[in-house]
Amino acid sequence: MHPPILRIGLTGGIGSGKSTVARVLVACGAALVDADAISRQLTAPGGAAISELASQFGPQMITPEGAMDRDRMRQLAFSDPAIKGQLEAIIHPLVSQESLRQSNAAVAAASPCIVFDIPLLVESGRWRQQLDRVLVVDCAQTTQIARVMARNGLAREVVEKIMAGQASRAQRLAAADICICNEGLSLEALERLVRELAPRLGL
């Protein structure tokens, strides 16, 4: 008899180190369902969302290669909440469908733990009841801004705007069952912390 599979929701603001934590958990034996990666596949050339996006928003939102024009769409969605809602109405159900398919595959493969990497876990509300625990990667907002500016070459205002569209640090921490504080840690120290945590997640 297999022990029950733990379903862990992993979240954190942009630049918090969430992707690193996900990578280490996978190395420890977890199955990963990455909502962002699924969303990117859906809007890549040949992706399942492309024809619907083109019909709703017009062919100018699709690049010559056949992908969604992410920059153009981001600007549009940022400036108009109604458009953001339309976009989410297309993408979210497809992400849910593919997430379910991947998690069923992980269950069939008897993975000890499935990590759902969900950037907007706290915001979406519908995820919480599907999870056993929520793991939040936390750091100061100034640290987030500095990391994202360095990593993505974005201007401070752009990073702040992205963060304004995400849950606040307090909201994320309130939703956390487990919190990893990624402040002033080297990459090695963060990885060590995650490996120490792994047994609590059935790994």
Image (tube, rainbow, N blue to C red):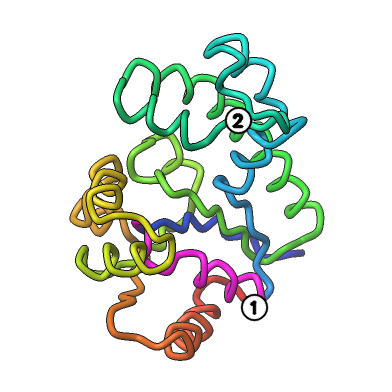
Q: Is residue 26 magenta?
A: yes
Residue 113 position in % (x across, y down)? 62, 63
Does 24 sit left or right of 148 as displayed?
right
Residue 180: quadrant of the picture = bottom left
Amino acid type, residue under disc 1 in the picture: Cys
Where does label 2 land, which residue?
68
Between 70 and 19, the residue placed more toward the observer is 70
Q: Is residue 17 magenta?
A: yes
Q: Secondary structure at mark 1?
A: loop
Give the magenta part as a residue range. Answer: 13-28
At a point 23% along the width and 49% down the height, the residue shown is 157
Residue 164: quadrant of the picture = top left
Where does label 1 land, which residue?
28
Verify CB contact (< 8 Å) between mark 2 and mark 1: no
Quadrant housing the C terminus: bottom right
Residue 79 position in % (x across, y down)? 29, 25
At a point 64% along the width and 29% down the height, the residue shown is 63
Residue 161 position in % (x across, y down)? 25, 44
Q: Residues within 10 Å of mark 1 (few under 14, many from 20)?
A: some
Q: Residues within 10 Å of mark 2 (few under 14, many from 20)?
A: many
Residue 93's mark?
none
Residue 53's place in the image compared with 157, above or below, is above
Quadrant housing the N terminus: bottom right
